[in-house]
Amino acid sequence: MADIELSRMTLDAGGRIRGHLEKLGRAGSTQRKTLSSLRAMLNNAVAMEWIQRNPLAGEQLGPPPKKEKRIFTDAEVNAMLAAAPDRWWEALIQLAYTSGLRKSEMLHLRWDDIDTDAGFVQVQERRDARVKAGMSEVPVFAWKPKTKTSARSVPVPPETLSTLLRLNVWAGGSPYVFVPTSRLLHLDRLRREGKLHDHYRILTELNPKFRKIQLDAAAATGKKNWRIGTLHDLRKTFGSRAAAKGVPMTDLHKHMGHASIATTSENYVQPDEGAAERLRRVFA
């Protein structure tokens, strides 16, 4: 792609770029992301009057490909909990599996968001602030839930609350459940130095570590066909299990914090094995 000069790009550039990516063995999702990014860059070039038209303006990208849903079994989750290297990972996996919280919601969860008496955790917007953590003063970073309906109270099982409370003793004073004081101080230092970008991640490298936990769990259980999932797949597992247990779709929609109930229905409605026979009997 680097050998295509901007001024010489023609209307067939999208096809040539796609063909080049296919020769390189790039997946369809990667091709789509690349063309989408190039189209946005070329739109900026048009706005800056560097070129007269965007040669990729008519490129049909199509919808993003859907990832196959990975649903963990109870045995697999128990194996991951056993393979967890510390209480931190044990609590994160257990909370995701038993509550359906998003990864960003768990990472921005604070201790004062947890109501142990009522058995709820609160997902809510946060503003920038500074709080005491032991002998240090640490930042609380501004954060918004994904959608308006994502701000919600989420019920959590007693055993998960107990795991979180054990983590509280071990955590060492951080206002966040899953973000240590050392990380907050590091981010605070980057912000003072002007090095903290807008899309900072409060914690990084979670997926590679979660992958290793799964590999260790597979090795410990002797399961050779373990399909690696992500932390988000624990949320999907919760939603699928809730639907299978008969939780009404309206209740599940509110619990998962989806913007539309259509999203909940599309992802978590389970087929009713008796529906076909009941439909046959409508005019019987």
Image (cartoon, rainbow, N blue to C red):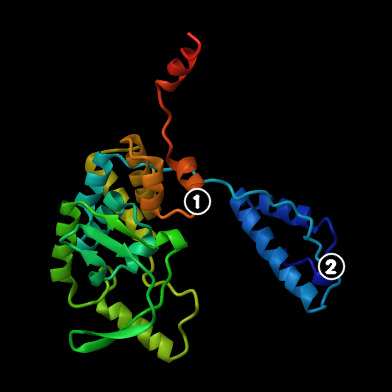
Let me know if residue 230 appears in the view: no
Of 178 and 244, which appears nearest the observer?
244
Of 156 and 58, which appears nearest the observer?
156
Of 253 and 78, which appears nearest the observer?
253
Q: Are marks 1 and 2 in contact (CB under 8 Å)?
A: no
In the picture provided, is 56 more to the left or to the right than 117? Answer: right
Distance from the alpha carbon under mark 1 to that under mark 2 = 37 Å
Position of residue 107 measured from the top left corner of the image (x, y, whole percent): 33, 66
In the picture provided, is 167 more to the left or to the right than 199? Answer: left
In the picture provided, is 62 more to the left or to the right than 204? Answer: right
Judging by the rendered image, the residue that carries numbered circle 1 is: 260
Would you place residue 70 above or below residue 196 in this image? above
Mark 2, Cα crowd under 10 Å, few <14 / some 14-19 / many 20+, is: some
Circle nearer the N terminus (1, 2): 2
Foreground mark, 1 or 2, reads 1
Q: Secondary structure at mark 2?
A: loop
Would you place residue 121 above or below residue 169 in this image? above
Picture quadrant of residue 124 = bottom left
For the point 84% across and 58% down, the residue is: 11
For the point 65% across and 54% down, the residue is: 31
